[in-house]
Image (tube, rainbow, N blue to C red):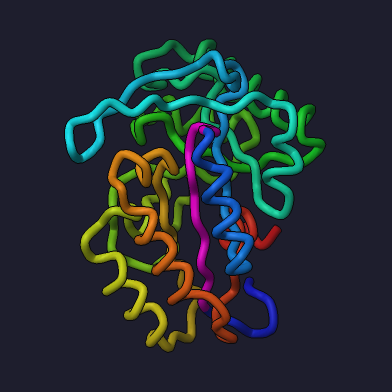
């Protein structure tokens, strides 16, 4: 499944197409790591903003990026579905769920000239109908937000839960565990988050340290979600 007989892969997954992705991509590229960026094409515009509070209680403006220039920014990484408008999919009827997923997929493929094969669930939530519709739309994996603290690949990729979030207190402990890991079966360290959280958490050093620690390991395959999970 992985190249050159490797049994370990590292992949990252970041949501919402926000301005902070620019800094995150620069860090990832510097360490030669890969990620999947999950976009909402129906609201992928700088006019779409919201406010979160940082760890000190100060308001931080979060802003999505305009589409122009994103193909160049995300070059070498994967683009995936995050729904058209970021609703709670489990609250919608089947036709609207399909519209949210299918149209986002079609838009991303048109804009970026690439094949889109996976997604991240908005808010990390779904039900059986949502998962069934994901498959109907031709998507082959779907990521949630519940930390497993595991590197095992589940049998059903449509309900894939990540290893952990980047702000998890166990992050570097898990990284060290993964580095030491020897396995005869494929294992994946799957990290997720939102890049704006590095601003609100004032913790860009966390992803810098994680990338530095994990990079340049001969036994690790540095992959997008699709490469790590599907071999594509």
Residue 184, percent from left and from top: 48, 86
In the picture, which quadrant includes the C terminus?
bottom right
Say which of 99 and 202 sits in front: 202
Residue 63, percent from left and from top: 48, 25
Q: Is residue 22 left or right of residue 177?
A: right
Quadrant of the rendered image containing residue 226:
bottom right
Quadrant of the rendered image containing residue 68:
top right
Say which of 187 and 203 sits in front: 203
Residue 211, percent from left and from top: 47, 68
Q: Is residue 5 left or right of residue 115?
A: left
In the picture, which quadrant includes the N terminus?
bottom right
Q: Residue at x 66, y 52 (%)?
A: 77
Q: Residue at x 41, y 21 (%)?
A: 89
Q: Residue at x 53, y 75 (%)?
A: 215
Q: Residue at x 66, y 62 (%)?
A: 231
Range drawn in magenta:
8-18
Q: Is residue 51 left or right of residue 158?
A: left
Q: Is residue 182 magenta?
A: no
Q: Is residue 16 magenta?
A: yes
Does residue 125 sit above or below 206 in this rendering? above
Say which of 179 and 125 sits in front: 179
Q: How many numbered marks are there?
A: 0
Residue 192, percent from left and from top: 41, 50
Magenta part, dominant SS: strand
């Amino acid at each position: 499944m992985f190249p050159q007989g490797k049994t370990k892969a590292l992949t990252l997954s970041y949501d919402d197409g926000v301005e902070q992705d620019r800094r995150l991509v620069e860090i990832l590229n510097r360490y030669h790591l890969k990620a999947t960026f999950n976009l909402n094409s129906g609201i992928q515009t700088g006019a779409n903003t919201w406010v979160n509070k940082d760890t000190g209680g100060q308001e931080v403006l979060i802003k999505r990026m305009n589409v122009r220039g994103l193909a160049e920014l995300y070059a070498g990484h994967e683009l995936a579905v995050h729904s058209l408008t970021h609703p709670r999919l489990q609250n919608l009827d089947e036709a609207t769920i399909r519209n949210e997923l299918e149209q986002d997929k079609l838009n991303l493929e048109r804009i970026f000239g690439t094949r889109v094969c996976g997604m991240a669930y908005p808010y990390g939530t779904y039900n059986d109908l949502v998962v069934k519709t994901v498959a109907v739309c031709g998507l082959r994996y779907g990521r949630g937000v519940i930390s497993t603290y595991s590197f095992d690949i589940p049998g059903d990729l449509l309900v894939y839960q990540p290893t952990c979030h980047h702000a998890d207190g166990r992050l570097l402990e898990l990284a060290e565990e993964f580095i030491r890991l020897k396995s005869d079966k494929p294992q994946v360290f799957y990290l997720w988050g939102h890049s704006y959280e590095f601003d609100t958490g004032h913790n860009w050093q966390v992803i810098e340290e994680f990338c530095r620690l994990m990079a340049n390991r001969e036994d690790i395959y540095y992959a997008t979600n699709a490469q790590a999970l599907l071999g594509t």
